[in-house]
Image (tube, rainbow, N blue to C red):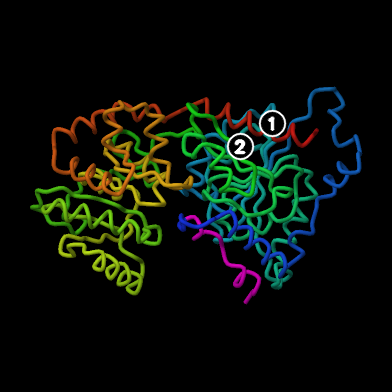
Amino acid sequence: QDPYIHCALTLFPLSFYYREDVAAIASQHYNIVTRAWPKLKEYVAPHILEMSSGDESCHENSADDKPKRISLAILSGTMQVGHSVSEDFGGVLSRLSRELFKITYVYIHEQGDLPIDPIFEEHTEENGGDDEIIHLYKNAEIDAGKGAWPVRLVEEMGKLRFDLALYLDMTMSRIARRMAMSRIAPVQLNTHGHPITSGIPNSTVQFFVSWAEAELPVDQAQAHYSEKLLLIPHGKMHQYYQRRIINESVSRLSGVSVEGYTLESFGLPRSHDGAIYLNMQKPFKIHPEFDELLCGILNKDSTGIAVLHKANTMDAHQIFLDRLESAKCPMSRLYFVEQQPHHSLIALYKLCTIVLDSYPAGGCTTSREVLEVGKAIVSLPARLLGGRWTLAYYNMMELDDEIKQKLVASSFEEYIDYAVQLGTNSTLLRNVEEEIDLKFPNLLGRKDAVEEWQNILLQAHKDAMV
C-alpha cells in the first residue's frame, strides 16, 4: 500500500547484469527516486551543518584531553543469525578496537522481527562493553506511505551525532538504501554486503570499501562505482572468518551433523559412477551465459550429471528448463534439488565431484564453504566484484600455481575443459583436493583483516576532519 516502496524497487538484481554500466544505472535510479521523493536527499544531520559552519566544538577532545573515540554507526537490514552479511562482517566488527571506536549497531527490521546475531552483542553493556544496538521498525500509525518510514529514521539517527556511518548491505536493504540518500554522518561508506555500487553521489556516500584481491586494477574498478574506492590491499585478508563446520562434522549454523547422507538423500541416482557437477546457487543468480558453460561440460563428459538448485515456483523452474534445453543441455542428466538446510547442503557439497562457480555472478560464502570441505571449484572471474571472490580466495590460500591453473579459467572453453579434466581424472582431482584441504586454513582467523578495516575507517574519518 506504500507506493514509495512499491515503485522505487531495489537495486538487488543489478549485480547480476554484468554487461551493463552498473554505476550509470544505479545513478539513474537514484535520480529518479529522489525526483519522486525529494525529501530523501534533503536531510542533513545538525552536527554536519555545524561542521560546515566552522563550529570548532565539533572537533574538540574530551574534557581529560584524551582523543575522542570515533562514533561509528553500522547499519544493516540483515543482522539476523546465520545471514551471509552477519557471517561476513561479524568477525571483523566484533574485533575493532573499542578504544578507537564507539560502535552503534543499527538493525533495520524490514524483514520482520528476526533475532540479531549474538556476535553483534559481544561488547554491549550486558557483556562488559558499551556498544549499543538500535532496532528500527516501521510504525504503521505514523509511517503512512510516501517514504515516511526512512525519512523519520534518518531524523532519529541524525540526532545521535555519528562520525561515520557504514552501511553493510545498502543495495540489498531497501530501507538502508533510502536512508543513505540522506546524511546522518559526515562520512558515509558503502561496502560489499551486496557487491554493487549505490549510485548515490559521492558527496553523500563518499566511499565504497572493497578488496583489492577481488577487484580489477583500481583504475579499471573505479569506473564500477559512484563512490571512491577504498581497498583492503593485495595480500591482506578482507574479513575475519571462522569455520562453519565445527567438531569436524557439525554445522555451526544449524548444530546438526553433516554426516550420514547419500546421493539418494537428495533424489540422485544411487549407482552413478561418473562425475557430479554441482551448482547450488539460487536460479535467479544463474545468468543465461552460464547455461553455455553447464551444457558444454555435460556434452563433453557424456557420463557426467549436473545438480542444480530448483526454483521456488513452477513457472520459474519451467523458464530455467526451457533455457537449458535451448542451450542444448542433455536434459536427462540434469537434476534439481530443493533449497536445503545448512547441514544437508554441506553434505551435498561433500558428495559431489566438482563445484561449478556460477558466471558472471559467482559465489562468496558458498565458495568458502565448498573450500572448507576440501572440494574444488572451477571459476571464470568476471568483470565486477561479485564474480571474482573465488579467485581472491585461491590467491589468499596461496595455492600452488600449477594447481590454481587447473581451477581458474580465462575463457568459456577453458572453464569447460578444466571442469571435465577434474571430473574425469581422479588422480588430478585428488591432488587438487589435497592442496585445497591443506591451504584452506590460510583464510581463517586473519588479524590483518581487522587491522586493515581499522586503517580504512580511521583514514575516512581523518579525511572528513580536514
The numbered dot on residue 431 is none
Labels 2, 1: front one = 2
Q: Is residue 454 left or right of residue 342?
A: right
Label 2 SS: strand
Earlier in the chain: of badge 2 and badge 1, it is: 2
Label 1 SS: helix
Q: Residue furthest bottom?
A: 1
Is 10 covered by the magenta stretch? yes
Residue displayed at 20% across by 44% down: 353
For the residue pair 136 and 101, the one nearer the viewer reads as: 101
Answer yes or no: do the residues labelled 2 and 1 have beta carbons within 8 Å? yes
The numbered dot on residue 230 is 2
Q: For the residue marked with disc 2, what is the amino acid? A: Leu
Q: Is residue 151 left or right of residue 209?
A: right
For the residue pair 194 and 361, the one nearer the viewer reads as: 361
Count of numbered badges drawn on the protein: 2
- Name the spot of residue 271 as percent of width and height, x first: 8, 52
Q: Quadrant of the C terminus?
A: top right
At label 1, counting other C-alpha atoms closer than 10 Å, the crowd grade (few under 14, some 14-19, many 20 or more) is few
- Name the spot of residue 427 as percent of width and height, x first: 14, 33
The vertical placement of 76 against 391, above or below, is below
- Name the spot of residue 51 as percent of width and height, x first: 86, 41
Q: Is residue 84 left or right of residue 59?
A: left
Q: Quadrant of residue 405?
A: top left
For the residue pair 450 and 417, the one nearer the viewer reads as: 417
Q: Which residues are magenta?
A: 1-15
Disc 2 to disc 1, C-alpha distance: 10 Å
Residue to which mark 1 is pinned: 459
Is 259 covered by the magenta stretch? no
At label 2, counting other C-alpha atoms closer than 10 Å, the crowd grade (few under 14, some 14-19, many 20 or more) is many
Name the main secondary structure of what is drawn in magenta: helix
Q: Quadrant of the N terminus?
A: bottom right
